[in-house]
Amino acid sequence: MKKIIGLDLGGTFIKIGVVTEKGKILNKKEISTPKGRGRQGILEVMAQSIDYFVKDSPRKQLLGIGIGTPGLVAETGKVFLAPNLPDWNNLNLKKIFEQKFSMPVKVENDAKAITWGEYKFGAGKGYDNVICITLGTGVGGGVILDGKLLKGEKYSAVELGHIPICYAGPKCNCGNTGCIERYVGAKYITEMAKKKLKGRKSLIREIIGGNLAKITPKTISEAYHRGDKLAEEIWLEVGNYLGVFFSGLVNLLNPQVIIIGGGIAQAGDIIFSTIKKTINERSFPLLAKDVKVVPAKLGKDAGIISCASLFLP
């Protein structure tokens, strides 16, 4: 039985495990991403984590090491522009870990790795044309066209979170204006909630004990599931923003399925049904009618499974 080591590097945690070719996790662990130790400190923890699993498996059984990382990733395995990681620019992770462990290494942007994992083992299985998006602090994702991960010319293509939906919209952290992330990132959803709460009653206040600093998408979802109208209004607005965004992508790419993952997707059907309704209203009817909008399936182990799946054709 062949195995693959999958390592998902996040700003808060490093998740790593050994995965079979069928997507089954045999062993895994989670380590805090070191703070204040710079690039070298993170690389050392990654190496120690990989070494733990390399020693635990016969070399002849290991196909290689799949790594998912924030940032733009070139075909060479070199990483650029990862704002939440220190000195994570012009860094060739593929070269570093191939030299250290003498085995093949594949490196991909973390959200694009998730897209490939969902395509191989999750909600995208059985489809050839897929859009996958992760909704959390930021917005990431990827595209599968004709069974292949869309790559672009030199770096990983498809920075979904930074596609503008309004030329005169609010400024995004990337420096542009009107990016979809600026409307549906977790920080901006909580800002929306605070504005809507002014002078209005809502279960959100009860859930957070009156402390507006405690508002999160999770507390908004809790209020919504308890019948709160203001929370429903927030999720309808978020769903409409996403629906407008996806309408353009449906017209551009003609996907079979749109997969949505991340914490914000936990709001439930109100997000999915609103997105689908808006797509139906705004995309070409022939392209909109058959596209499915579904939740991601891989769950909390998505990163490990997806990074391992980079070795699977």
Image (tube, rainbow, N blue to C red):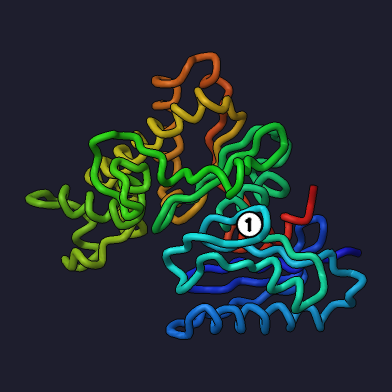
* Residue in view at x 74 percent, y 74 percent: 27
Please provide percent x and percent y for residue 215. 26, 61
- Is residue 1 positioned above or below 277 on the image? below
| Horizontal and vertical percent position of residue 73 | 59, 56
Q: Which image quadrant for residue 279?
A: top left
Q: Is residue 41 above or below residue 115?
A: below
The reply to whether residue 308 is visible in this rendering is yes
Q: Nearer the viewer, residue 298 or 70?
A: 70
Q: Residue furthest left?
A: 199
Provide residue 248's location: percent of width, then percent of height.
Answer: 44, 27
Q: Disc 1 residue type?
A: Glu
Q: Which residue is mark 1?
A: 108
Q: Which image quarter holds the N terminus?
A: bottom right
The local crowd at label 1, few if under 14, some if 14 to 19, many if 20 or more residues have their Cα within 10 Å, is many
213 with respect to 33 (left or right): left
Q: Tell me what residue is drawn at x 59 percent, y 29 percent.
A: 255
Q: Nearer the viewer, residue 70 or 293?
A: 70
Q: Quadrant of residue 138?
A: bottom left
